[in-house]
Image (cartoon, grey):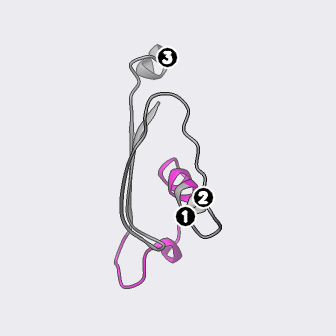
Amino acid sequence: MLVNLTIIDLAVVKSLDLDLAKGMSALTGETGAGKSILLTALGLALGDRADSGYVRPDCKRAEINLEFDLTDVPLAQQW
């Protein structure tokens, strides 16, 4: 289960540290609120192709970190 998403210098996001509670989480918000940026960050962290266009203007690189809790997923622990 994904428990934390950290984004630094990606698109318009300077810094975001998002803790997710156990169970289901929903991304909601108005147009332009940043839902797609969160999904893009997840995709990039999981292996989507990246290009320099994702990096925030005037920054050299972007950073995305995912933290998972695999306590309840024995198969993932073995992998």
Q: Are marks 1 and 2 in contact (CB under 8 Å)?
A: yes
At horizontal 58% and vertical 49% (from top left) the residue drawn is 27
Which residue position is annotated with label 3? 75
Depth check, mark 1 against mark 2: the one in front is 2
How far apart are the two marked residues, 1 and 3, measured between alpha carbons? 33 Å
Residue 66 place in picture, x, y as percent: 40, 45
Residue 13 position (above or below residue 7)? below
Q: Is 42 inside the magenta-drawn segment?
A: yes
Which residue position is annotated with label 1? 34
Residue 50 place in picture, x, y as percent: 53, 65
Q: Is 45 inside the magenta-drawn segment?
A: yes
Residue 22 position (above or below residue 45)? above
- Please give the label number shown on residue 29: 2
How far apart are the two marked residues, 1 and 2, measured between alpha carbons? 8 Å
- Badge 1 density bin: few <14, some 14–19, many ≥20, Cα 10 Å: some
Provide the secondary structure element on which disc 3 rests: helix
Residue 62 place in picture, x, y as percent: 38, 67
* Dot placed on the residue nearer the N-terminal end, 3 or 2: 2
Magenta range is: 39-61
The one nearer the camera, 73 or 78, is: 73
Provide the secondary structure element on which disc 1 rests: loop
Name, please, the residue furthest toward the front.
Answer: 30
Name, please, the residue furthest toward the bottom.
Answer: 58
Q: Is residue 73 visible?
A: yes
Residue 41 position (above or below residue 9)? above
